[in-house]
Amino acid sequence: MGLRKQIAVGFLWAVIGLAGCSDLGTEPVSIDPPEPTVSFADDIQPIFAQNCVACHGIQGGMSLNVAVAWSNLVNVESTSYKPRLRVVPEDPAASVLYLKLMGDVTTGDRMPQGGSLAPAAIELIRVWIAEGALNN
């Protein structure tokens, strides 16, 4: 095969190869975020009602009663651990609530006082926070 023919064949293969890399004008695929798997009303509030409201049941800044629990937690500065937030949506490791449930020494005593939640309950709270701490 002559040099011209080799160059022509090489050029042809390059064009074919580049054509295969083209998106041919297709629209980008949008990926919707996954639906939350944990519901505040159905999964998280019952944990608070069973384990936390005995101490955090009074109306006020740290009440976990059903009517005010979400608004007292999410994006609210912790009274005792300023400027940290009680719940940082999508970031359990930065959320005072989660750290207290895990017994992290930077947030004082583990909650609930005198014990701990079941690992499954703590995991539900972690997932709820990781999924954006929605009021759902």
Image: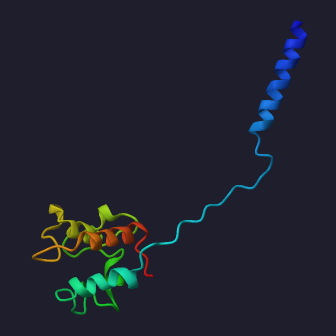
| Image quadrant where residue 134 sits | bottom left
Quadrant in the picture for residue 133 = bottom left
Above or below, 67 against 109 in this view is below
Q: Nearer the viewer, residue 79 or 122?
A: 122
- Direction from residue 87 to residue 36 in the image, left or right: right
Left or right of 126, for residue 81: left
Instruction: Point out residue 8 in the picture as x, y percentages from the top left corner.
Output: 88, 18
Residue 11 appears at what percent x and percent y? 84, 22
> Does residue 52 appear anywhere in the picture?
no
Q: Position of residue 62 (x, y in %)?
A: 24, 84
Q: Residue at x 13, y 68 (%)?
A: 108
**Residue closest to the eye, 1 or 41:** 1
Residue at the spot x=33%, y=90% of the render?
Answer: 66
Tally of numbered tags: 0
- Left or right: residue 85 compared with residue 38: left
Q: Quadrant of residue 53?
A: bottom left
The C terminus lies in quadrant: bottom left
Task: For the N terminus, give its image quadrant.
Answer: top right
**Residue in the image at 83% along x and 29% along y:** 15
> Is residue 18 shown left or right of residue 117?
right
